[in-house]
Image (cartoon, coloured by chain):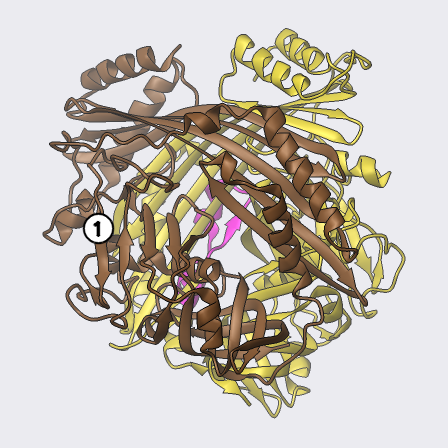
Amino acid sequence: MLEKSIVEEVLGLALSSGGDFSEIFAEDRRTNNITLQSGRVEKSLSGRDFGVGIRVFKGFTSTYTYTTDSSRDGLLKAARNAAQAMSGSPSAQTQPFVTETISPLHAIEWNPMQVAKSGKVGVMKQAYEIAKNYHAAIQQVMVYYFDEEQNVFIANSEGKWIEDQRVRSRLIIHSTATDGHKVESGFYGPGAHKGFEFMKHLDLQHYAGEASRIAVTMLGAAPCPSGKFPVVIDNEFGGVIFHEACGHGLEATSVAKHNSVFSDRIGEKVAPDLVTYIDDGTLPNEWGSITIDDEGEKTRRNVLIEQGILKGYLIDRFNGRRMGMAPTGSSRRQSYRFAPTSRMTNTFIAPGESTPEEILGSTEYGIYAKYMGGGQVNTTTGDYNFAVMEGYLIENGKIGAPIKGATLIGNGPKTLQLVDMVGNNLAHGAGMCGSLSGSIPVNVGQPMLRVSEMTVGGTKGDE
Amino acid sequence: MNVESFSQELLEAGKRFGYADMELYHERVKTFGCQLFQGEIDNYKSSEVSGVAFRGVFEGKMGYAFTEKIAEDSIPFLLENARENALIIEDEESEDIYSGSERYREQTYYSNELQQVSIQDQVRLLLDIERLILAYDERVTGTNYCMLQSSETERSILNSKGLDLKDLQNSLTLYISVIVKSGGHTKTGTYVKVTKNFHSLHPEDIAEQAAEEALRQLGSRSIRSRAYPVLLRNDMAAALIQTFSPIFSAENTQRGHSRLLDKVGASIGVSALNIVDDPSLPEGICSRNFDGEGFATQRLQIVENGTLLSLLHNRKTAKKDNTESTGHAHKSSYKGSVTVAPSNLYVEPAAKGHEELVSSIEEGVIVTHLAGLHSGANTISGDFSLAARGYYVEKGQIQFPVNQMTIAGNFYDVLRSIQDVGSDLEFSYPTAASGYIGSPSLLIEALSVTVE
């Protein structure tokens, strides 16, 4: 993507005022976004992102400059700006480049850039028809299509020279249902680190049908009761709870500065034996998968919690310095506009032994969260919140009436201790995760599991 | 290749390619940012990026494409992709390129004073704030974030119908988060400010506000979960309105994503409720003389004495509703297509100060922090259930901070159950898609409160 001599010059200039490490990240990304409303293509947008980010470290100080001007002059100017933030005389030198060739972990069969947009629209229309015809109460269906080809190049002053290509595809179905008074909505957004083959093999009947089924079900839902209850969280996107309650707190971004509730706790028992929590960027073709991270480090399977014991963190190069720990292939960024930092890829609770029937059957009264919405956490206090998109009451071990408007709040480390059953049906769901280094694709996953007590905030009031 | 010659070449190539009308939207953004940790600069950031959005009418339909690579090989990329995008469009209402409004306000929203603030002065401000925070109280253990970012955005629209508009903006964002610990409990307090006026930032005030925000939560207790009158402090009232501001967009009523469909002229709130969108506020972060389509912007009364007077429109949604654009075409950047969004939208302040509102509460809850706004609020149904922090009030007096809680209700009902509107207008952190949204403190008759 960039000439070797220029890269060498840029990395050297970046070190000219005392920096001890410099890095360049170049990105050329093509994207397509199409929106279908009422069965018609309403918007279609294509684009090309192209930019370069330069990073310099000096001890525990880091500078980052980025630019869309990839000419020699533009890059040298950015490198000079990065160096200027430091003060000192040159202390480190750039090492000769060693080109690393990687074998991609996530094979792409059909690059979406080679597919006519009319073909993409065809898939969207099929999804629309399924969702729209699901039920007479369906009022509106929006279908969003997204694909991208992201080419990245990373080199650093230690001699790294590496390139990678990431191809991703996603389809989002958003149905709204009405009974004439109320309006409710349902959503499903499957995605993968795959090309157009993903769309071709996608079970549209299932995903589009589910989006509409959720919307129609919620029309008949009663306001959720408030209070403290056992909560059974279903598999797949249900994993968002641990993404919030514990995943973010294990990122070096907050751990390194001792600001996380999980800082300095390696080896401690932070959860019951039932809980094993893993982040794995190597899972073939998953939405959150990558072959190398955005510092050029190979991704791997990082066991964070093993049978309740805290084993490790997600670590990037810069925060690793403060922690005295090696990077874990977890450094990610939305684009060249962000300095990379430790983030999740595909994070999930490993399967346990209970069947879903056993978990529900042994719950006298509680809340069953079938599909979760998004959530948020304060990693310093551990306080989190997230929304239940489709929920039900559990009465006498059976799924009862649907409820709406439930938000679950709590404290990550405390909730983790209250997991008392883990199911055997692990599945993963696609989402976007926003943090310091921008919005990135991640999977969250888990089998069905139960938390013995959570605070449920609903509109119905106290039970 | 510079943008001017790129634009010329693109428009000429586009004509040969078969486009009728064409438009180029160009944006250049420069930023500087830095973050402190324990008296040291832990992060510097600076950037200069630019990009071009192309749109053009091909066989009667509008196609879009953008690029950040201002180079020869991007011209066929834009023309071919925009054509393919145009050809698959099936929207009943066709878009066109706008030849321009008769008159544009000639206000400037660029602060020369801010532009002249040196990087050293910006760093010094952060150092002062951090030092004052750490010395403020022994229970303060550190900061999570102590950072600022200044940015400058230049945008221009150039089209084949003769429109040629330019605009320059700047602002500075300060984000502080303080950690306090006491008796095994940890709390954080944040301070966020976006401003064009650097000299309005006083380190003592900021340090006190941020530290107090955290300290006042220590010693939190539980209260019975039930419905309470809720006083939404100005910044949180603004945050809630910001979350639900999409309901005022005609794009959403037309999609069935807002319950304000066919409600223009009807009462949607209490008579004390007045909402205005004013793109000409001198201190407004989303102030602008023209919108994303080049349409001249103007002040718009959205709600007057509880009655909905107008929705927000761009030219396309206006055409569908047989009305005029209100100048709210929005382009989040050159990467976005044209949507609808507010500029500076706010609830007009009334008479009572925040303290006076507190003293009028027999028993209730003050909300000083909301979380989960992106997930716990359904902008279509209006239902929300949000994580909150705040205080318990009895007989007009704040009694104690409350443990993490949720407040739940329906936004459409909230508009009809505002008991009192304060005088203390404050704006929340602006986002491109939802505008710069302000509100005074709002006293709501009742919301369902669940406490941990």
Quadrant for residue A174, please give it. bottom left
Q: Quadrant of the C terminus of chain B?
A: bottom right
- Report if residue A201 lies within the magenta region: yes
Whether B256 is drawn above or below A362: the answer is above
The letter of the yellow chain is A
Q: Residue A136 location, x and y as percent?
A: 27, 73
For residue A46, side relative to residue B324 (left or right):
right
**Residue closer to the observer: B164 or B130:** B130
Q: Quadrant of the N terminus of chain B?
A: top left
Q: Tell me the crowding category of disc 1: few under 14, some 14 to 19, or many 20 or more residues within 10 angstroms, Cα based.
A: some
- Report if residue A71 lies within the magenta region: no
Q: Residue A441 location, x and y as percent?
A: 56, 46
- Residue drawn at 80 percent across, 38 percent down: A320
Q: Residue B414 location, x and y as percent?
A: 36, 72
The letter of the brown chain is B
For residue A376, side relative to residue A49 (left or right):
right
What chain letter is assigned to the residue under label 1? B
- Residue drawn at 59 percent across, 31 percent down: B122
Kind of residue at badge 1: Leu
Q: Taking the image as drawn, is residue B183 in sight? A: yes
**Residue closer to the observer: B53 or A234:** B53
Whether A245 is drawn above or below B268: the answer is above
Whether A280 is drawn above or below A148: the answer is below
For residue B268, side relative to residue A297 (left or right):
left
Q: Residue A11 location, x and y as percent?
A: 69, 15
- Read off the residue under disc 1: B300
Range shown magenta: A188-211
For residue A151, side relative to residue B5 (left or right):
right
